[in-house]
Image: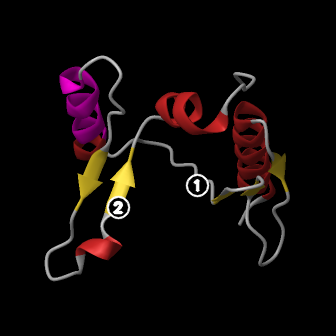
């Protein structure tokens, strides 16, 4: 991994930790963001996965007021316990992280 990519990764982890009001503790074998009840791995990509964005955008568009919009991704042949729940960071923070600083 290049120094530039490491720096960008550090900056993304730090920004997410600040946004959620938590701590960045990343290092070899450690979680990226740590909170009292949350462990988060932060991954940065150059381009978004369009179909995944579409799933979340549809959930946001169709959610009623007061509902948490999430997308659930099921992988054929896997147990539903292993399905993924995806949502916008803003929605996650509003529902679960209390007061936060926007990065």
| Residue at position x 22%, y 81% in the image | 78
Within 10 Å of disc 1 (Cα), the crowding (few <14, some 14-19, many 20+) is few
- Give x and y (percent) for residue 14: 79, 42
Quarter of the picture holding the C terminus: top right
Q: Establish if 100 lies above or below 22.
A: above
Which residue in the structure is indicated by mark 1? Answer: 43
**Mark 2 crowd level (few <14, some 14–19, many ≥20, 10 Å Cα):** few
Mostly what secondary structure, the magenta segment?
A: helix
Using the rendered view, name the quadrant where residue 26 is placed: bottom right
In the image, residue 1 above or below residue 48: below
Q: Which residue is mark 2?
A: 84
Question: What residue is at 85 percent from the left and 59 percent from the top?
Answer: 25
Residue 34, x across and y down, in percent: 77, 56
Q: Residue at x 28, y 45 (%)?
A: 71
Q: Residue furthest left?
A: 76
**35 left or right of 82 in image:** right
Q: Nearer the viewer, residue 26 or 44?
A: 26
Q: Nearer the N terminus, badge 2 or badge 1?
A: 1
Boundaries of the magenta span:
53-63
Position of 48 relative to 83 (above/below): above
Q: Secondary structure at mark 1?
A: loop
On the rendered structure, is 29 left or right of 91? right
Tell me residue 29's x, y (percent).
77, 78
Q: Is residue 61 magenta?
A: yes
Q: Is residue 66 a member of the stretch shown in magenta? A: no
């Amino acid at each position: 991994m290049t120094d530039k990519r490491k720096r960008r990764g550090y900056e993304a982890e730090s920004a997410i930790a600040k946004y959620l009001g938590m701590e960045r503790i990343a290092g070899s074998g450690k979680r990226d963001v740590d909170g009292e009840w949350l462990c988060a791995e932060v991954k940065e990509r150059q381009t978004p996965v369009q179909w995944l964005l579409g799933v979340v955008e549809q959930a946001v568009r169709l959610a009623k007021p007061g509902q948490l919009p999430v997308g659930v991704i099921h992988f054929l042949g896997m147990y539903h316990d292993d399905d993924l729940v995806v949502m916008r960071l803003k929605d996650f923070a509003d529902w679960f992280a209390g007061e936060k600083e926007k990065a």
